[in-house]
Image: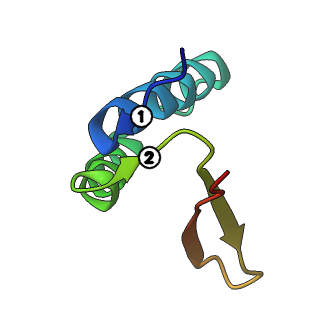
Amino acid sequence: MILPLTGQQYSDKVLENFVTIWKSFGIYTEAEEKVIEMFLQVFKDKNFPPGSSVLFTQSSSGSLTINQIYIYR
C-alpha cells in the first residue's frame, strides 16, 4: 500500500541522504546546517499524496526553484 508522506517525513529522508553524501565528501559544515534548516522550513506544511513528485530546478546563478507536481489517477 502506498501512503502519503508529510513534508517532515519527506524532508527527513532527503536530508538523511544529503548529510551522508556531504559527510563522505568531507564538506559538512555550518553552511550545510543552515541549508538543512531552510529545507525543513520549505516542506514543513506540505503533504505528498501518492503519485506526487518534487521537481528541483537550479539556475546558473545558483537560485533553486522547487515545484510540487501532483499526478491524479
Question: In terms of secondary structure, where does tag 2 sit?
Answer: strand
Q: Are marks 2 and 1 in contact (CB under 8 Å)?
A: yes
- The spot of residue 8 in percent (x, y) is 28, 37
Please, which residue is most extreme toward the front here?
Answer: 73
Protein image colouring: rainbow
Q: Secondary structure at mark 1?
A: loop
- Left or right: residue 49 compared with residue 73: left
Q: Residue 44, image x and y in percent? A: 23, 51
Q: Please say if 52 is above or below 62.
A: above
- Where on the picture, by quarter, is residue 23? top right
- Name the residue located 66 percent from the left edge and 57 percent from the top edge: 71
Q: Residues within 10 Å of mark 2 (few under 14, many from 20)?
A: some
**Residue 30 or 44: which is nearer the viewer?**
44
Where residue 62 sits, quadrant-wise, is bottom right
Q: Which residue is mark 2?
A: 48
Q: Position of residue 72 (x, y in %)?
A: 62, 56
Point out the residue furthest to the right here.
Answer: 60
Q: Amino acid at mark 2?
A: Phe
Q: Please state which of residues 44 and 40 is positioned toward the viewer in this rendering.
A: 44
Say which residue appears at 42% left-offset and 35% top-offset: 10
Badge 1 density bin: few <14, some 14–19, many ≥20, Cα 10 Å: some
Q: Is residue 21 placed above or below 5 in the rendered structure? A: above
Amino acid carrying mark 1 in the image: Pro
User: Which label was assigned to residue 4?
Assistant: 1
Disc with the residue nearer the chain's start (2 vs 1): 1
Q: Which x, y percent locates residue 60?
A: 77, 81
Residue 5: quarter of image: top left
Direction from residue 13 to residue 73 in the image, left or right: right
Q: Quick one: quadrant of the N terminus?
A: top right
Q: CA distance from mark 2 to mark 1?
A: 5 Å
Residue 54 tag number:
none
Please tell me which residue is depicted at 55% across the width and 31% down the height of the picture.
Answer: 18
